[in-house]
Amino acid sequence: MSVTQFQPNDAALAAHLMTEEAVADLPFTSMKKMDEDHARISGDNRALVSNVSKLHGLTEIGDAMEGDEDAAREIIQAAQEYKADPAGYTDKVFGDDAPEIAAEESAPAPTAAAPAPAPAATPEPAGEPTSNPASFAFVAPEAEVQMIPRPASTLFQGIGSTYSSELIPTAKWLTPKPKMAAPDKDFMFNGYACSVMALAIEERKNVIATGDPGCGKTEFFKQFGAQIGLPVHKIPMDGSLSRAEIIGSFRQVATPNGSETPFVLGKIPRLIQQPCIIVLDEIDQADPDIMYMLHSVLEGEGLVIQEEGGTPIERHPHCYIVATANTKGRGSDNGLTHTRFEMSEATRDRFPYWLNFTFMEPGMEADTINAKTGLAHALCVKMVDVATRIRTAYNTGSLSQTCSLRQMLDVAPMAKKFASRGDEVGLALGMEAVMVGRANPDDGRTIREFIKTAVAVDLNTTEI
């Protein structure tokens, strides 16, 4: 079926016919129930037709009254094929153009030609020195991708049936594919978060993820990028990088003829020229002056390097910007997470989509630890119990530290090391090293009590 056969009005009529035929087969119980069923079925069918239409380049559904029934029937057939096998139908539509997703490792890039040299500085009249030598970094990298929709069910583990048929933009590299981190096969995705990210990519909007330290915000973006085929670059915004490192600065460099002082681009202007996902990590700790400079980037307009005579750095159309924060930019509710600066409303307003992250449901978290580490599932359940108690105490202000999944993954090898003293004792000793060891004395005593309750091992009387 060709793209030209998918017209907005025909697609609308297809969804209408599917709904009317489905409703006609329902037994009548009451008008209220009939109306509810009609609304539900209509919504499901419009979503299905919309998804299959996007594969054929149609982004909107029109007016059913203006549709052609023969064309609508063909769209219904396509929708039924897609529903039965989303991945197979997608491959059928795109053929060899379908992107390779989530390979264990990126295929090695073919040998590329040497990068083009930087453009020479404009010659100046004889006898007049060049004020600013030619910059190293003002050559836009040649990297291009095509974003192709694929069903979420083929990409993301754990998203559930609600989001499984949603189409997610994925990258087909038209130039050599850069090296990327291999995806985590055990990572469990949140369907709603994936859906928001898909829309953000389509609309080129920025996304910010907020939540307690260690709840998986950055890891979500990293794994999302790995699954859709885009490299993910994390930039710490907590003050560990200077303005020169983030934006750029003049730097003295040695040359065959002595030395020069070109303007060398920082991380942001280098990365925005490439197809990628940029994670502004802990943006609620960022210097407002730096964020002000990035406002034009967040609006999709790129950067202007004033130090280089107003040189523009364009943002690549497939460069997507996301951020993480432990707060909403105003400090935490429990007063334990402090921000160096208050995030301005102008910056907050440039992130229209906000995702609120929480820790995984305990059962899922225990399953994840078991899958990643091989630690006995029963011990994983007990460890998650301790972590949940720590997190609850942290959120109420009773503890000054929380407990991340990363910490529990670090406990597992320690628990195995000490398992010869008994499984529970080994687990308790692992938590002593990872969770209690980093705590202040008061918090440490509280965490030991949590361990005693959940694991039945008293670390105050156990030989350590």
Image: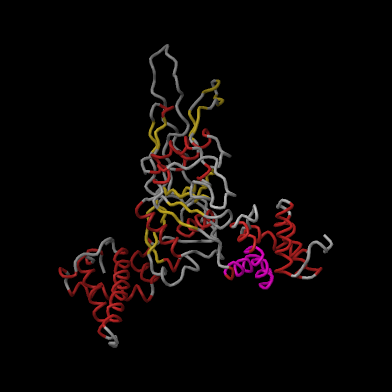
Image coordinates of residue 7 in percent, x first then y, are 21, 65
Query: In this view of the protein, which residue sits in the foreground, 175 or 58?
Result: 58
Count the marks: how many? 0
Name the image quarter holding the C terminus.
bottom right
Left or right of 407 in this view: 3: left
Quarter of the image where one finds residue 299? top left
Residue at the image point whose x is 58% and y is 57% from the top: 395
Image coordinates of residue 51 in percent, x first then y, are 33, 66
**How is colour applied across the structure in the image?**
secondary structure
Image coordinates of residue 190 in percent, x first then y, are 48, 64
Instruction: Inspect the magenta stretch and tell me whether residue 246 lies in it.
Output: no
Residue at the image point whose x is 61% and y is 60% from the top: 391
Give the residues drawn in magenta, as a range: 364-388
Query: In this view of the protein, which residue sits in the foreground, 76 or 287?
Result: 287
Query: In this view of the protein, which residue sits in the foreground, 112 or 393?
Result: 393
Left or right of 243 in this view: 350: left
Instruction: Inspect the magenta stretch and tell me whether residue 378 lies in it.
Output: yes
Image coordinates of residue 438 in percent, x first then y, are 71, 52
| Main secondary structure type of the part rendered in magenta | helix
Quarter of the image where one finds residue 447? bottom right
Query: In this view of the protein, which residue sits in the foreground, 314 or 161?
Result: 161
Residue at the image point whose x is 61% and y is 58% from the top: 404
